[in-house]
Image (tube, rainbow, N blue to C red):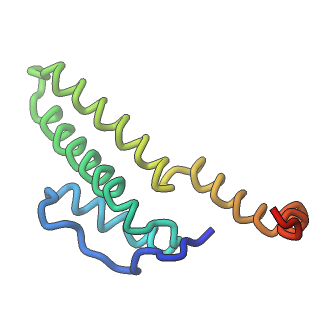
Amino acid sequence: MSNENPLPATSTAPGWMAEDAREEWDRVYPILAARRVLTAADMASLENYCTAIGRSRQLERAIQNAGDDIDLKTIRMQDKLMSTARQLAVEIGLTPSARSRSMFRDKEEGSVQDDLFSQLDL
């Protein structure tokens, strides 16, 4: 299903984003724009998703560099960020299950049932 006002095919990440978050933006934005699933109303979700992924990557580096001195708070923070990113990924259509639901809706839009209901004056 395409939106009436999808985002343009190219867009740069917001300037305030950290490098890891911008890298995720550069990776997923072209995919989402090509699918025509995002509008301006979805930008906050995309920004938050990229920020969560970026911070999770930063924390992973800190965990790897900590060696035996791993701080459990850091691991809990990373776990929370990964959970948040996963939830946002579903919202913006980046997971296999979200994509399959979208494809199912696209197929159903042209169904006989839709044609029957469109003929009713409701």
Q: Position of residue 51 (x, y in %)?
A: 24, 50
- Left or right of 18: which side holds 94? right
Count of number-bearing discs: 0
**Considering depth in this image, is 32 or 72 the residue closer to the camera?**
32
Quarter location, residue 109? bottom right
**Considering depth in this image, is 84 or 5 the residue closer to the camera?**
5
- Left or right of 17: which side holds 107? right
Q: Position of residue 7 (x, y in %)?
A: 41, 75
- Identify the image quadrant of the C terminus: bottom right
- Left or right of 15: which side holds 116? right
- Identify the image quadrant of the N terminus: bottom right
- Left or right of 2: which side holds 10? left
Residue at point 40%, 46% (across, down):
88
- State whether residue 76 is above or below residue 22: above
Identity of the residue furthest to the bottom in this view: 9
**Considering depth in this image, is 48 or 78 the residue closer to the camera?**
48
Residue at point 29%, 37% (across, down):
81
Q: Position of residue 26 (x, y in %)?
A: 30, 68
Quarter location, residue 16? bottom left
